[in-house]
Image (spheres, grey):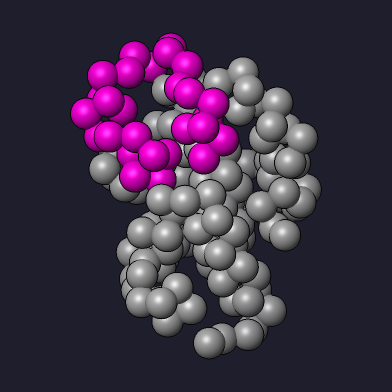
Amino acid sequence: MALVTSLSFPSLNPLPLLSAEEIITRSRQGVLRRDADRVAGLVGITDKELAVALGLSTSYLHRLKEDQRISQDASERLLLLENLLRHALDTFEGRAPTVLNWLRAPLRELNGQTPLQSLDTVTGYTLVDRVLGRIDYGIFG
């Protein structure tokens, strides 16, 4: 599964995806609020979209100071989101606007939901990543 493999993405800074072990360790420590802004900035998702993906309210996300740590659950979701966005950027050859449009488009593979709507559960991250994997291999529908 691409969420936890160590691939590099030449269209971004050549950073590998986080391994499952790294996600667990960093989630338990809690990531900083500023990391959420950095991840959202990879493709330009809004604070509202980010809050849904992290399982937080938008108002709570706005109240967090940039040096505050977010909860373990929200940290895990953020790290999964980062891997997912990096996978999407690799799939769509670094074209952030294309990734953003894809994230907001309803997909038959997700029962008519958008990938962003599917990220309200951890299982949704896996499903969206599988769709990207299918695109990577040219398997549509």
Nearer the observer, 109 or 139: 109
From the viewer's perspective, is 131 left or right of 115?
right
Who's the residue at 56% across and 86% down the image? 140
> Is 141 left or right of 37, judged from the image as shown?
right
44 versus 114 height, above or below: above
Q: Is residue 50 visible?
A: no
Instruction: Return the x and y of residue 58 as percentages of the image width and height.
Output: 25, 34
Q: Nearer the viewer, residue 34 or 96?
A: 34
Question: Depth check: 109 or 87 in front?
Answer: 109
Q: Is residue 134 visible?
A: yes
Magenta run includes residue 133: no
* Snapshot quadrant of residue 30: top right
Please identify the quadrant where the N terminus is shown.
bottom right
Residue 14 drawn at (x, y percent): 69, 43
* Residue at 69% from the left image edge and 32% from the top image edge: 24
> Residue 68 in magenta?
yes
Instruction: Identify the residue at the far left of this view.
Output: 59
> In terms of depth relative to the viewer, which is nearer, 28 or 90?
28
Residue 17 locus on image (x, y percent): 69, 45
* The magenta segment: 51-77
Q: Position of residue 57 (x, y in %)?
A: 27, 34
